[in-house]
Image (cartoon, rainbow, N blue to C red):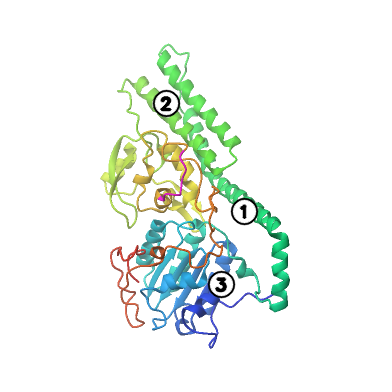
Amino acid sequence: MAAEPAAHAASGSGSGIPAVADALKKNPVYVDPRASSQLTSSDAEALAKKIKDSGKPVFVAVLPAAPEFPPKTLLQDLRAEVGITGVYAVHLGNGFNAGADPQVMPHTAVLNLTGALKRSYGSDTAGLLNAFADQADQQAAGHAPDSWGSSGGGGGSGAAIAAGVVVVAGAGGGYALYRRSRKRKAEREQAALDRLRTVIDEDITAFGEELDRLDFNPSATTSDDAMRRDYEHALDCYDRAKAAMAAARRPDDVQQVTEALEDGRFSLATLEARRSGAPLPERRLPCFFDPRHGPSVRDVEWAPAGGAVRSVPACAADAARLADGEEPMTRTVQTASGPQPYWDAGPAYAPWAGGYFGGFGGGLLPGLLVGTMLGSAMSAPYAYADTGPGFDGGWDNGGDGWGDAGGPQGGDYSGADFNPADFSGGFGDVGDSGGFGDFGGGGDSGGGFGGGDW
């Protein structure tokens, strides 16, 4: 078995962007010898292995602040030289920036992630790059380029033979690629559904426990027809949620489950009001922080970490916590980076959230989630189709999500056919003697990236 290409470059193997691009075609991580103090050989190899194991088209370069790496055009030029659709991250001198083809990762997701990591990791290059890879591996669509696992090469007579094979096997090769694409799509859907199943099972169990604690007797003299209807509807919703989850075959199918649970919890809230003599509740969105808390009672001001303040629906308990200066009881889910709030756990949770927040009122969740990873994915124009108000359908991002649109997928060779605005940005101090760059506030230089500057 051939040895894995070294993540660090060897001296004398070329210079400038072409040399970096040539190395990245063979391995996901490149460290220029002059920048070896930023990322050790062992750290670079571990990072490269992590990316390869994820099977995603994520490219990382660690470079010195040198004339052959002009900051203003570095990302665009590197993307053009490599020619592979993917996510590109560059640590240049003491600065950091990233870009991505939109069919692989939404522009806003790259911007939010890059900015957050700059603020969190400062001059910890290894920590920053590993955190970026963890999130990009989780969010990026596409597959690792074939060149990472091949030795390349091939001479004159071999090329002539290969040309003949292409002519004879063209149609068969196209069908093979189609089958491979369909297989990968099915595998991705199954992996996403498996992640969602754990969360959904927790939700169904929690609703069942609410029903068990209810202490409602439909035949009691204090029960009227309206109460019985509410109770029966809640039971029906519980059964509908269980049946929908048992029948789920694709990630999008779980939206029916959370729609049923949301509907059932509103019936329980209505039943409780009838039994206590309180005014019937207004039909509102569930609690934003954890839909298991039931219908919200009012909107509160809240901001995600590093994001802008917005108005979100909250249950009475979470509204009180925020009013007292405490953190709300947020729903977290397991990710490769450990427990995370559902809005920072990646686009796989969009159908789950869509059932809770998209079932009525026009599908408000993308607006509530602006500035978060899930919000970035859902706000992308290609992210979701339209079989529900704002949700459902499937990922349709250039043929490598859950949909089947054409065009190059992440990891496919696309040459210089890309939008340079997706690989540009402002610049600050990237000199080796400076601080961690002059990271301006979301600069807008040609569609700049996370935090704006290097």
Main secondary structure found in the magenta portion? loop
- Which quadrant would the N terminus be assigned to in this image? bottom right
Question: Which secondary structure lies at badge 1?
Answer: helix
- Could you tell me which secondary element the residue under label 2 belongs to? helix
In the image, residue 130 lies at what x, y percent? 48, 67
Label 3 and label 2: CA atoms lie apart by 57 Å
* Residues shaded magenta: 380-386
User: How many badges with numbers are in the image?
Assistant: 3
Residue 348 coordinates in the image, percent (x, y) = 50, 49
Residue at the disc numbered 2: 267
What residue is rendered at 34% in x and 52% in y?
Answer: 304
Task: Sort mark 3 into few (<14), some (14-19) or many (20+) by Cα contacts within 10 Å.
Answer: many
Quadrant of the image occupied by residue 64: bottom left
Task: Identify which amino acid the numbered label 3 is placed on.
Answer: Lys
The residue that disc 1 covers is: 181
Identify the residue at image location x=34%, y=45%: 367
Q: Are marks 3 and 2 in contact (CB under 8 Å)?
A: no
User: Quick check: can you spot residue 43?
Assistant: no
Q: Nearer the viewer, mark 3 or mark 2?
A: 3
Question: In this orientation, which residue lies closer to the viewer: 158 or 74?
Answer: 158
Quadrant of res 97: bottom left
- Work out whether mark 1 precedes mark 2 in sequence or the reverse, and give the earlier one: 1
Where residue 32 sits in the image (x, y, percent)? 48, 81
Specify the quadrant that holds the C terminus. bottom left
First in sequence, mark 1 or 3: give its number: 3
Find disc 3 in the rendering and name its residue.
25
Is residue 78 visible in the rendered image? The answer is yes
Residue at x 72%, y 67% (from the top left corner): 164
Name the residue furthest bottom.
12
- Which one is closest to the eye, mark 1 or mark 2? 1
